[in-house]
Amino acid sequence: ASTKPSFFTRASTFALSKVKVGTPLYSLAYGAAAGVILSGLVYAGRTLSVMCFDHEYYKLQSRKRYYEKQLLFTREQEEASNAHYLASLSSEYDPAATRMPFKPLEPKYRF
């Protein structure tokens, strides 16, 4: 008397009989596996490209440094311009013009 095959044995033989070369299920599985492998290769290639050949980061850092230097230069120019403007205003300052007519100059208006 032969023993009855187990459920897993029967299920696996049934599945393998449905996935033989030339069946639609075999084609789908083969395509899915090929897609996974291809996408893995593309991912590895892009990672390698970014790690070895991507210099965009350095370009951006350089541009940021240049912009910061430009910004500091323009701020210094503005500060100098404001200082010259104040100096020109103070050269025009006439304390006598702030006193009341025929009165002495108050000490708070002295420069």
Image: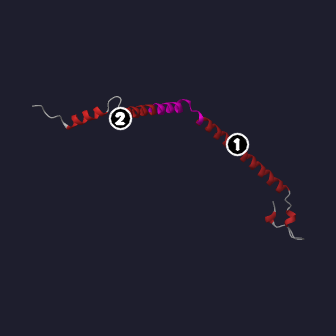
Depth order, front residue of 76/11: 11
Q: How many marks?
A: 2
Q: Decide if residue 39 is on the left or right side of residue 89.
A: left
What residue would you read off at disc 2?
25
Quadrant assignment, res 8: top left
Depth order, front residue of 2/100: 2
Quadrant assignment, res 55: top right
Depth order, front residue of 8/4: 4
Secondary structure that dominates the magenta span: helix
The single residue placed furthest to the right in the displayed view is 102
Residue 69, relative to residue 105: is it above or below?
above
Depth order, front residue of 60/22: 22
The residue carrying pointer 2 sits among few (fewer than 14), some (14 to 19) or many (20 or more) residues within 10 Å by Cα, namely: few
- Residue drawn at the location 75% of the way across and 49% of the way down: 78
Q: Residue 107: percent from the left, percent from the top?
A: 80, 65
Query: In which quadrant will I find the N terminus?
Result: top left
- Residue drawn at the location 64% of the way across and 37% of the way down: 62
Where does the magenta region start and end?
40-56
Residue type at mark 1 is Gln
Query: In which quadrant will I find the C terminus?
Result: bottom right
> SS at mark 2?
helix
Q: Residue 48: percent from the left, percent from the top?
A: 50, 30
Residue type at mark 2 is Leu
Residue 87, relative to residue 40: is it above or below?
below
Q: Is residue 102 magenta?
A: no
The residue carrying pointer 1 sits among few (fewer than 14), some (14 to 19) or many (20 or more) residues within 10 Å by Cα, namely: few
Residue 5, relative to residue 87: is it above or below?
above
Q: Nearer the viewer, mark 2 or mark 1?
A: 2
What residue would you read off at disc 1?
70
Q: Decide if residue 55 is on the left or right side of residue 89.
A: left
Q: Earlier in the sequence, mark 2 or mark 1?
A: 2
Residue 27, relative to residue 87: is it above or below?
above
